[in-house]
Amino acid sequence: MKLSLLIFLFLIITVFSGRYEELVNQINAANAGWISKENLEFSKKTDEDLKRLFNLKIDPPENFEKTKIRREKLTDPPANFDAREAWPGCIGGISDEGKCGSSWAIPAVEALSDRLCIESNSTIKVRLSPQFLVDCDSYNFGCNGGWLYAAWQFLTSNGSVSIDCYPYTSGGSGEPGLCRNTCTNGSDFSFYFANDFYGVWEVYWIMTEIYLRGSIQSAFTIFEDFLHYSSGIYSHVAGNEIGGHSLRIIGWGVDNGVDYWICANSWGTSWGINGYANILKGFNECGIETTIVTGHPKVAN
Ligand SMILES: *[C@@H]1O[C@H](CO)[C@@H](O)[C@H](O)[C@H]1NC(C)=O
Ligand SMILES: *[C@@H]1O[C@H](CO)[C@@H](O)[C@H](O)[C@H]1NC(C)=O
Ligand SMILES: *[C@@H]1O[C@H](CO)[C@@H](O)[C@H](O)[C@H]1NC(C)=O
């Protein structure tokens, strides 16, 4: 009994751990400025699971034309900027979307939460609920992806409630829940809103936006190698394109002359650099500098 269990486990581990071995070796041999480590969480997933997880819709350029685009430019941006240092206590940590393709919602509510704290001089310190969007935003597709613009439209018109009121519950099932109209403990909703939303692109505008107002949401084309990122400055090296993904950019830096964005991902803290990734800046890597949406928080009526 015990022996057969051990053999079974051994087989499972050997089958899964081989899946991306060649890719990981290829990346590490390329000396591309980052280190890859096989992420067994993704090795275990079926193609169907991956498809759902990376079903994010990357807004076409027309969506940008519909909304205001901010074109502010700092004259002399610093070489390094980290929102966590600029606004201590305002910038949220790392979430875990689990099996639910909610990366359209998590960075949106996270960026708005950061911005509410910043704009209110730390008087509004609330972490907003992505689950409220997953369950209730009918312009988007729950655990099956969504549009950044539609997420911010929803945050502007409907807002979100606190994560304590409406916790994240889709990580295990990969399915959305029913849209509720009270907190889990039965108390009434208190809503928090974005005042407006807009696109930002071009490296200097993006830096200016983060420098003045904090975190932004970005969508990019995801390739298999990103799943197995461990440290360093990511740029696409190898592997197939597998869809779209979104994350929150909270600053930038430079290492040995190579510029990067500091990005908060939503795959828990054991992925990447404690849940964060540094992604090459200035080259529109995988489209990361062309699909950026953010907005002003609503801090007063
Ligand atoms: C935050 O502080 C700034 C500068 O002191 C002030 O102009 C602004 O009105 C304050 N905002 C809030 C919401 O209190
Ligand atoms: C979003 O706001 C609209 C307009 O106020 C309202 O009709 C709708 O019920 C809201 N949706 C949710 C899920 O709260
Ligand atoms: C219910 O949860 C909300 C949100 O976390 C909280 O503000 C409120 O105090 C709770 N109410 C009770 C009766 O525990």
Image (cartoon, rainbow, N blue to C red):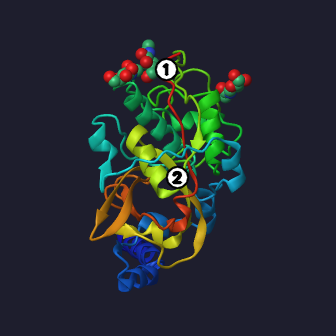
Q: Residue at x 45, y 73 (%)?
A: 12
Q: Identity of the amino acid at label 2?
A: Ser
Q: Secondary structure at mark 2?
A: strand
- Residue nearest the observer in this picture, 281 or 155: 281
At x 34%, y 57%, the residue is 270
Residue 53: name its quadrant: bottom right
Say what secondary structure mark 1 lies in: loop
Say if 133 sits above or below 5 in the image.
Answer: above
State left or right for residue 59 relative to residue 250: right
133 or 233, which lies in front? Answer: 233
> Residue shown at 36%/44% (left/top)?
93
Q: Position of residue 238 (x, y in %)?
A: 50, 79
In the picture, measured across the screen, residue 177 lies left or right of residue 111, that is right
Which residue is denoted by mark 1 in the rendering? Answer: 185
Q: Nearer the viewer, residue 49 or 280?
A: 280
Q: Nearer the viewer, mark 2 or mark 1?
A: 2
Residue beneath disc 2:
218
Q: Can residue 156 be seen?
A: yes
140 vs 193, nearest the viewer: 193
- The residue at label 1 has a CB less than 8 Å from ligand 3: yes
Residue 26, x across and y down, in percent: 42, 84
> Residue 41 at x, y = what percent?
45, 63
Vertical relation: 282 (above or below) 57:
below
> Where does ligand 1 appear, by image quarter?
top left
Q: Amino acid at mark 1?
A: Asn
How far, Cα to Cα, is label 2 from label 1?
33 Å
Q: Earlier in the sequence, mark 2 or mark 1?
A: 1
Residue 82 against residue 225 in the figure, above or below: above
